[in-house]
Image (cartoon, rainbow, N blue to C red):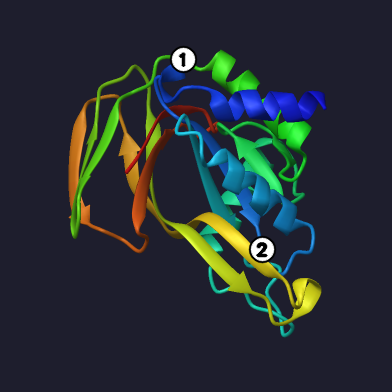
Amino acid sequence: MKHLLALAALLAAPATAQARPTVIELFTSEACSSCPPAEALIGKLAANKSLLPLSFHVTYWNGPAWTDKYALTAATDRQTNYAALQHSNDDYTPEAIIDGGPGIVGSNQTAMTAAIAAAQAAQQPAVPITITGTTMLTIKIGPGATTAQIWLFGYDSHHTTQIGGGENNGATINETNVVRSITNLGGWTGTGVTYTIPKPAGDHMAVLLQTQAGTILGAGAE
């Protein structure tokens, strides 16, 4: 009961509670039988605009029984890099990374709620990020005090997929904020900068300003 109340409080929190959204990265696969509960939890969390959940579909579950059409090699690489930051080679699904921190089981509602609350409490003033445009994007990043990498993610807000094979055969999965493209825009030196680039795949866009150690300095979405 306590974890249900904590989740309800989190979902009811106002969008103005943080200077930037708290980033939730879910590493998942349509071929993983443990992933649908994590997908459902991400769908609930997406209702809170102070959170930025992104679903990264990995490739290592793909096989003859079922191939996840949203799986990206770059998503698998991103998860592997997070594991390396924790001195691990253990990639698994469903794994959630909250604000670039250690991985937790993405279907564990209690752990997810606690990790989000801890990340929000530790959040520092953010580097401002804005994204505008349709076919061409204008991305503006304000100044800051350190260096980081600039990541652009294109994502679709919702997909419903009927699974025709593998561990989830016969299931219908509702998927939220499915990442369709991953672009590294290069390094950021702490100086304010503006990019104008063609819009990559995805109905919506998110930009993360992230250090090599995983710390998120800024996050924005449109």
Q: Nearer the viewer, residue 123 or 102?
A: 123
Can residue 93 be spotted in the picture? no
Side (left or right) of 2 relative to 80: right
Q: Which residue is mark 2?
A: 29
Q: Is residue 62 above or below residue 13?
A: below
Residue at image point 45% right, 33% down = 49
Residue at image point 56% right, 67% down = 160
Q: Secondary structure at mark 1?
A: loop
In the rendered image, residue 199, in percent from the top left (x then y), is placed at 25, 58
Can residue 107 be spotted in the picture? yes
Pointers 1 and 2 in contact (C-beta within 8 Å): no
What amino acid type is highlighted by mark number 2?
Answer: Ser
Q: Which residue is mark 1?
A: 124
What amino acid type is highlighted by mark number 1?
Answer: Gln
Q: Secondary structure at mark 2?
A: loop
Image-quadrant location for residue 62: bottom right
Residue at image point 51% right, 17% down = 123
Image-quadrant location for residue 88: top right
Residue at image point 80% right, 23% down = 2
In the rendered image, residue 30, in percent from the top left (x then y), is placed at 67, 67
Label 1 neighbour load within 10 Å: few <14, some 14-19, many 20+: some
